[in-house]
Image (spheres, rainbow, N blue to C red):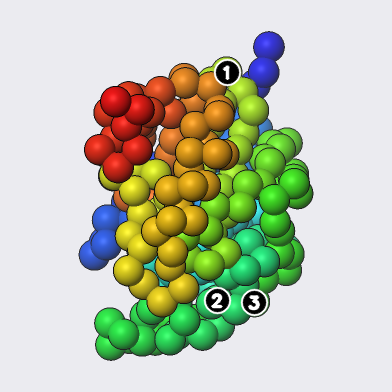
Amino acid sequence: MPPTLNIRTLVSMPFEENSYVVWLPGSTECVVFDPGLQPELIEECLSEEGLTLSAILNTHGHADHIAGNDAMKRLAPDAPLVIGEGDAFMLENADANLSAGFGFAIVSPPAERTVSEGDTVEAAGLRFSVLDLPGHSPGHIVFVFEGAPTRVFGGDVLFRGGIGRYDFPGSDGRRLLDGIRRKLFTLPDDAVVYPGHGPTTTIGHEKRTNPFLSER
């Protein structure tokens, strides 16, 4: 049987951004997806669960999804920071990651590894495949865990009843919609999507009901 996962969702204000702490039952190692503006929530979770951070995984380079990278690297200096090849430049550029436009500059340590479609990331006993899904940002990626069910750590691509914004610099709505249809909608209907904002959903639910992508 494919392994199950423990997943903790931690919501950072003011953008209500979802960070995820993920680990195998019985393990003391974990990965963190998209540490946000309240990294102390992640630190508290790791302490409560008795976990050591093994990797920091960024779905994309916008400020609300990378703001906690520096705190995570200080907490676990040996945990590699991983991001899509096309968004790596945003980590150290407050204009590119959009924080400068909000009146505060957020920068991150540089990535130790950049990835693109076809790559895999292995950490904490977990294995994720990488899909390129640009459109919200130029180098947005999605991490897929093959399990029962499949889990998609999707950042700001597909939401429950919505899709990621495509009015930012480097965004492209056509590429976003095309990528969702060709790459996410070919996953099993029961695949669970853990988005960058809002509640979880499934691929089947979004295929049937998402007003931007509905089959009807």
Which residue is depicted at the point 75% across and 49% down?
119
Q: Earlier in the sequence, mark 2 or mark 1?
A: 2
Residue linked to disc 2: 91
Residue type at mark 3?
A: Pro
Decide: few, some or many residues near mark 2? Use Cα within 10 Å; few <14, some 14-19, many ≥20. Answer: many
Which image quadrant is residue 87 in?
Answer: bottom right
Q: Classify mark 2: helix, strand or loop.
A: helix
* Left or right of 84 in this view: 194: left
Residue at the top extreme?
1
Which residue is depicted at the point 54% across and 52% down?
133
Residue type at mark 2?
A: Leu
Residue linked to disc 1: 148
Q: Classify mark 1: helix, strand or loop.
A: loop
Q: Classify mark 3: helix, strand or loop.
A: loop
* Left or right of 68 in this view: 78: right
Which residue is depicted at the point 48% across and 43% down?
180
Residue linked to disc 3: 110
- Give me the C-alpha separation between circle 1 and circle 3: 34 Å
Q: Earlier in the sequence, mark 2 or mark 3?
A: 2
Q: Nearer the viewer, residue 38 or 98?
A: 98
Residue 35, percent across and down?
47, 59
Check whether the beta carbons of the residues at disc 2 and disc 3 lie within 8 A of each other. Answer: yes
Residue 165, percent across and down?
33, 60
Q: Earlier in the sequence, mark 1 or mark 3?
A: 3
Decide: few, some or many residues near mark 1? Use Cα within 10 Å; few <14, some 14-19, many ≥20. Answer: some
Decide: few, some or many residues near mark 3? Use Cα within 10 Å; few <14, some 14-19, many ≥20. Answer: some
Residue 6 can be seen in this image: no
Residue 149 can be seen in this image: yes
Residue 14, percent across and down?
24, 65
Counting the numbered discs, the total is 3
Which residue is depicted at the point 68% across and 12% down?
1
